[in-house]
Image (spheres, rainbow, N blue to C red):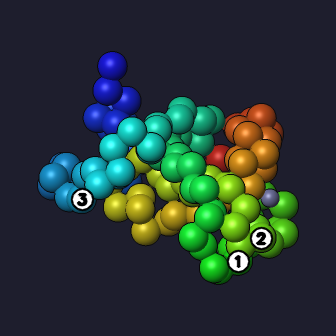
Amino acid sequence: MSPRRARRRGPFERPDGRAARPVGASVSGVDRVESAPDGEWVVRNVSGATQGKAYRCPGCEQEITPGLPHVVSWPAWSGGEDERRHWHTACWRNRVNRGPGRSRY
Ligand SMILES: [Zn+2]
């Protein structure tokens, strides 16, 4: 079982983009790939312990307090890392539960 290699059917995937920047290669065992109605997402748990910056959660439009454990996610296709977003862990869960009505494409 190697979900990190399950790179399939990304709408933005390019035939020549396969070798570009393996997702999460430097933090093996932390990232995971989740399937959602709007595609596959790489999700990373962030302890927040060393973060000094507040991020705005796209789920609830509230700030993620510095130091608060949360998740970072980005699309699991080539180049998706450029769209990294910081989410409250609960908001990330709720995003999936909201269903396919919020498809991004
Ligand atoms: Zn939130």
Q: Amino acid at mark 2?
A: Thr
x, y (%) of residue 22? 25, 52
Mark 2, Cα crowd under 10 Å, few <14 / some 14-19 / many 20+, is: some
Label placed on residue 54: 1
Quadrant of the image containing the N terminus: top left
Exactly how many numbered labels are in the figure? 3
Label 3, on which residue?
A: 21
Depth-wise, is mark 1 or mark 3 nearer the camera? 1
Q: Amino acid at mark 3?
A: Arg
Residue 38 falls in image quadrant: top right
Q: Is mark 3 within 8 Å of ligand 1?
A: no
Q: Amino acid at mark 1?
A: Ala
When the figure is inspected, residue 51 is found, relative to residue 10, above or below; the finding is below
Q: Pick whichever of labels 3 and 2 is earlier in the sequence.
A: 3
Mark 1, Cα crowd under 10 Å, few <14 / some 14-19 / many 20+, is: some
Cα separation, mark 3 vs mark 2, equals 30 Å
Label placed on residue 65: 2
Q: Residue at x 63, y 79 (%)?
A: 52
Quadrant location, ligand no. 1? bottom right
1 and 2 marks in contact (CB < 8 Å): yes
Q: Pick whichever of labels 1 and 3 is earlier in the sequence.
A: 3
